[in-house]
Amino acid sequence: MNRSRIVEGLIIDAVRDVTGKFTAQPGTPAAVTEAAKVIVNQTNNEPWYQSRVTWGAIAAILSGLGTMAGLVAAGDWTPNLWVAALGSVAGGVGTIYGRWVAKKPLGQ
């Protein structure tokens, strides 16, 4: 079962839940399928605090900063450890930037 069919079923179920019925009009399945394609491919527009991507990036940033704080406290200046910690912070910052400025999905 492809995503369009799954989303089409979810839309129909939601309409039934709200209205108590779903009356198929001529052309409704095609319209629902088109709506499903838009929903599946749309850019996430939820508030930042509801974005799992944003929270994952924040966790990566905090993890990198925590590692750096531990390295400073231990007086450890091993380059490999610092590169890994800085990579975590840079990756998190890049992810947040990309997520917040994205206007359309990749490949669209």
Image (cartoon, rainbow, N blue to C red):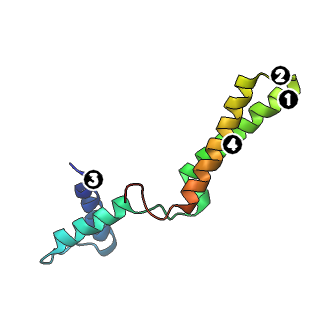
Spatial separation of the CA atoms under disc 2 and disc 4: 20 Å
Q: Where does residue 70 sit, x and y in percent of width and height?
A: 81, 28
Which mark, residue 61?
4
Tag 4: residue type? Ile
Q: CA distance from mark 1 to mark 3?
A: 49 Å
Mark 3: few/some/many CA within 10 Å (<14, 14-19, 20+): few
Residue located beneath label 3 in the image: 3
Which of discs 3 and 4 lies nearer the camera? The answer is 4
Cα separation between marks 3 and 4: 33 Å
Does residue 81 appear in this view?
A: yes
Residue kind at label 3, given as amino acid type: Arg
Q: How many marks can you see?
A: 4
* Earlier-in-chain disc, 3 versus 2: 3
Q: Secondary structure at mark 3?
A: helix
- Confirm or deny contact between disc 3 and disc 4 (CB under 8 A): no
Q: Residues within 10 Å of mark 2 (few under 14, many from 20)?
A: few
Disc 3 to disc 2, how far (Cα)? 50 Å
Query: Does dot 1 land on a helix, a strand or a loop?
Result: helix
Task: Tell me residue 74's x, y (percent).
Answer: 86, 23
Q: Which residue is mark 1?
A: 72
Identify the residue at horizontal 54%, vertical 50% (top origin).
52
- Which residue is under mark 2? 76
Name the N-terminal-most of marks 1 and 3: 3
Residue appearing at x 64%, y 40% in the figure: 60
Say few, some or many: other residues with alpha carbon within 10 Å of mark 1 (under 14 / 14 to 19 / 20 or more). few
Callout 2: SS? loop
* Amino acid type shown at disc 1: Val
Q: For mark 4, give the secondary structure.
A: helix
| Label located before the other in sequence (3 or 4) | 3
The one of 91 and 63 positioned closer to us in this rendering: 91
